[in-house]
Every structure is written in C-alpha cells, then in structure tokens.
Image (tube, rainbow, N blue to C red):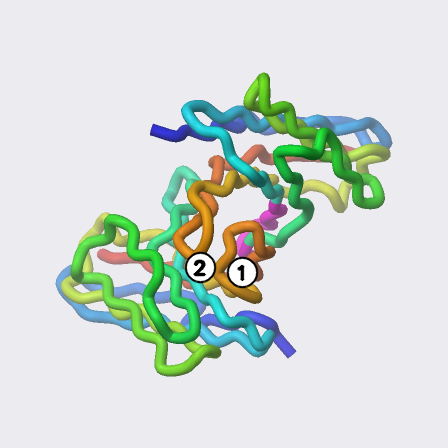
Amino acid sequence: SQKIEQNSEALNIQEGKTATLTCNYTNYSPAYLQWYRQDPGRGPVFLLLIRENEKEKRKERLKVTFDTTLKQSLFHITASQPADSATYLCALVRGSGNTGKLIFGQGTTLQVKP
Amino acid sequence: DTAVSQTPKYLVTQMGNDKSIKCEQNLGHDTMYWYKQDSKKFLKIMFSYNNKELIINETVPNRFSPKSPDKAHLNLHINSLELGDSAVYFCASSQDSLPAETQYFGPGTRLLVL
C-alpha cells in the first residue's frame, strides 16, 4: 500500500537558518504533491503544489523540490522566522479525476528559535 | 467572513450517543470533504461531495453518514459513538473535485467520546 513518511521528530533550528523538511513516499507515483501548514488547534493551510514534471517550485521564502526517482520531496524555508514554527504536512495525490484524493503524511513540527 | 466554518468547535459526549457536526463554506466551491485527524496527527479523508453528490466514500463505518443539503453545506452525523471516534474532524472545500485543487480547511471539531 502507498505510504508517506515525514520525519516525526521535531525539527529545531535557529532563526535565520534554512529549514529543510523531508517527505518520502513508497509504492506510488503521484502526479502532484502538495504541502500544507498546520498551526496548533487549526486546520491545515495550503502552501504549494508541485507537479511530477516540475523539479522545483518557489513561493517567497518557500521552495519545494520533487524527485520522482528518489520518491522524495524536500520543503525548504529560507531565512526562517519564529512565525514559521508550525507542523508541515505533505500530501500526495492518489488517483485521478473525481475520485482522486489527497493522502497526507503525519507532518513534521518545525520550531524556529529566536 | 470565515471561508470554511464548522460547528461545534468542541464536542464531548458519552459512548452510544448520536451527534452531528455542521460545515459551511462561503467560497462558492463545488466540492466539500470530511477528514479525520487522529491522535498521531494523521489526516485521513472520509468523504467528499461534489455538487451535493457523494463521490468519495472511504472505508468508514456505516455509523458515519454525511449529508449535503446544498453545495455550501456538508454535515456529518455519527450514530452510536465509540471511544475510537475521538479525534479532530475537519471539513474542507475546493473549487472542484480534481485532486490537484487547493483544499481550504475549516478550524476542526474536537470530538471526545467518554
């Protein structure tokens, strides 16, 4: 069965550094992969989508890569700030058309210290 | 002007009771979803509706019955609540049912079954 793995251990980094979060998947070749941010007590918020034919996608301080050979996506936050502290979820798209769905990883919690 | 709203925010109830959670979106989206987030933070899709029609029904006990009276509303009724139903339930919506579409999540309903 398809599996998505994110580092379940919290990632602690110093303000100003680059945070890199990893999302690995097995037994599947998704056409798309999405990243969401979830703050405590709130619903996930969409950040970025990357397609299988895209190697990299950027949005302000965020960068996502998608390596379909390694079956891995990396999520980078440059010049990190304490306000970036949250849990980051990756989600791959399984299926297509109306019956396609998002399969989420369990998320990695990022803590940025001032 | 909340985009996706859910009520109630918290729900504490006894085993065996029946309860409902309501969801409304004012984004004009065609597709709505119910997700369950367990204690390990895995977010799993339960149902999705497109224009009031059920299109995704994951392996969910029959005790869970979604109802969509119109495009902007998706309610979840749970019969004979069990301890294992304790979780956070998120409603979400997207412009259409294609899986690459951005999903907008509500704030969640924290259900505790005693």
Task: Report x, y in % for residue B73.
Answer: 43, 77
- Three-letter amino acid code of the residue under disc 1: Phe
Task: Report x, y in % for residue B39.
Answer: 38, 42
Q: Quadrant of the C terminus of chain B?
A: bottom left
Q: Mark 2 falls within which chain?
A: B
Magenta segment main secondary structure: loop
Mark number, residue B105: 1
Mark 2 vs 1: CB contact within 8 A = yes
x 64%, y 39%: residue: A51
Q: Quadrant of residue B48?
A: bottom left
Q: Residue furthest bottom?
A: B69
Q: Quadrant of residue A52?
A: top right
Callout 1 secondary element: strand
> Is A5 located above or below residue B19 in the figure?
above
Real-space CA distance between mark 2 and mark 1, rounded to the nearest whole angstrom: 7 Å
Q: Quadrant of residue A114?
A: top right
Task: Kindly identify which residue carries mark 2.
Answer: B90
- Three-letter amino acid code of the residue under disc 2: Phe
Q: Nearer the viewer, residue A33 or A81?
A: A33
For residue A29, side relative to residue A13 (left or right): left
x 44%, y 41%: residue: A94
x 44%, y 59%: residue: B90
Q: Which residues are magenta?
A: A36-43
